[in-house]
Image (cartoon, rainbow, N blue to C red):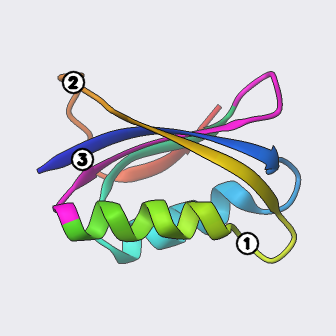
């Protein structure tokens, strides 16, 4: 099991980024969430099998067509919250 917290920077709000991430994460069988941050970034917490999490990270770096991702900060997350699915929050 791998669990990461991503901070996605660039033009990532108002371009369908959360819906894009939700669809990718669910297709990969991941749990966690995606949300907009007040500073214009998007936060993604993803947990699941190593290859699936790595695939989501690659998708987040590309983003949906209308997005312009400048940087994705990837941090290992040691949290103990349990997520039963992947959802959009905030």
How many angstroms separate mark 1 from mark 3 (CA)? 25 Å
Few, some or many residues within 10 Å of mark 1 (<14, 14–19, 20+): some
Q: Is residue 42 magenta?
A: yes
Which is more toward the observer, 7 or 32? 7
* Between marks 1 and 3 in the image, the one whose residue lies nearer the viewer: 1
Closer mark to the observer between disc 2 and disc 3: 2
The residue under label 3 is 84
Along the line of sight, which residue is nearer the eye, 68 or 36?
Answer: 68
Give the residue displayed 38% in from the left and 71% down from the top.
55
Q: Secondary structure at mark 3?
A: loop
In front of the other: 87 or 13? 13
Pointers 1 and 2 in contact (C-beta within 8 Å): no
Up the image or down, 74 lies above or below 78; here it is: below
Task: Name the side, left or right, on which 20 lies relative to 67.
Answer: left
- Residue 28, above or below 32: below
**Mark 1, secondary structure of its residue:** loop
The location of residue 11, given as percent across then percent down, is 87, 50
Foreground of the two, 17 or 76 = 76
What residue is disc 1 on?
64
Quadrant that contains the C terminus:
top right
Query: Can you give x and y, in whole percent of width and height, for residue 75 in the image?
Result: 39, 33
Q: Quadrant of residue 7?
A: top right
Q: Which tag, 2 or 3, sits closer to the chain's start?
A: 2
Q: Quadrant of residue 50?
A: bottom left
Could you classify mark 2 by the number of other residues whose Cα lies within 10 Å: few (under 14), some (14-19), or many (20 or more)?
few
Find residue 73 and report its horizontal and vertical position in percent: 54, 39
Locate residue 57, reporting x and y percent.
Answer: 46, 60
Magenta region = 37-50
Name the residue: 57% across, 61% down: 60
Q: On the image, numbered disc 2 is attached to which residue? A: 78
Spatial CA span between label 2 and label 3: 17 Å
Marked residue nearer the N-terminal end (1 or 2): 1
């Amino acid at each position: 099991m791998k669990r990461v917290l991503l901070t996605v920077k660039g033009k990532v709000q108002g371009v369908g980024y959360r819906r894009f991430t939700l669809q990718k994460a669910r297709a990969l069988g991941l749990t966690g969430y995606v949300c907009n941050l007040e500073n214009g970034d998007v936060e993604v917490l993803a947990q699941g099998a190593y290859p699936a999490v790595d695939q989501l990270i690659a998708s987040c770096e590309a983003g949906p067509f209308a997005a312009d991702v400048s940087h994705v900060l990837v941090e290992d997350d040691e949290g103990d919250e349990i997520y039963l699915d992947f959802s959009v929050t905030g």
